[in-house]
Amino acid sequence: MEPVTYIDRTWDGEKIVETEKECTDYVIVDANTTAFENNTWYVVSENMTVDSRITVNDTANLILCDGATLNASKGIDVSGGNTLNIFAQSENENAMGKLIAEGEDY
């Protein structure tokens, strides 16, 4: 599996610190992805539409590769006690990956 780079941003108490990192253990998001879970890393490497609601269980990490869009047409459910961390590959606004999450009432 090829490493995927991403930018990790943290707060050092005074300023945002950006560090480029690599992820080597991840799942590629596809049209059948319905859950992000269990401290797993997920990568959107190309334009992708998921027509089911995506549920976050525990903590999940999502990398949006440059030029790739994830359209979660039924939204992403991040209920209490769960966390979704979203990372970009670059700071270039014209190249950055995108997340489109449209919600439904449940």
Image (cartoon, rainbow, N blue to C red):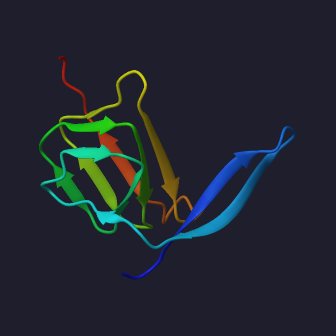
Asked if residue 80 is positioned above or below residue 3 in the image, the reply reads above
Residue 58 figure quarter:
top left
Q: Residue at x 42, y 66 (%)?
A: 65
Along the line of sight, which residue is nearer the eye, 40 or 5? 40
Residue 16, percent across and down? 76, 47
Asked if residue 48 is positioned above or below residue 46 in the image, the reply reads above
- The quadrant of the picture occupied by the N terminus is bottom left
Left/right placement of residue 52 relative to residue 23 reads left
Residue 75, percent across and down? 25, 34
Q: Residue at x 29, y 53 (%)?
A: 70
User: How many circles with numbers are drawn on the protein?
Assistant: 0
- The quadrant of the picture occupied by the C terminus is top left
Along the line of sight, which residue is nearer the eye, 29 or 1? 1
Asked if residue 105 is positioned above or below residue 87 in the image, the reply reads above
Q: Residue at x 25, y 48 (%)?
A: 71
Left/right placement of residue 53 relative to residue 6 reads left
**Residue farthest toward the bottom in the current orientation of the protein:** 2
Residue 97, percent across and down? 42, 59
Asked if residue 59 is positioned above or below residue 65 in the image, the reply reads above
Left/right placement of residue 31 relative to residue 60 reads left
**Residue farthest toward the right in the current orientation of the protein:** 14
**Residue farthest toward the top in the current orientation of the protein:** 106
Left/right placement of residue 15 relative to residue 95 reads right
Q: Residue at x 70, y 63 (%)?
A: 19
Residue 40, percent across and down? 38, 54
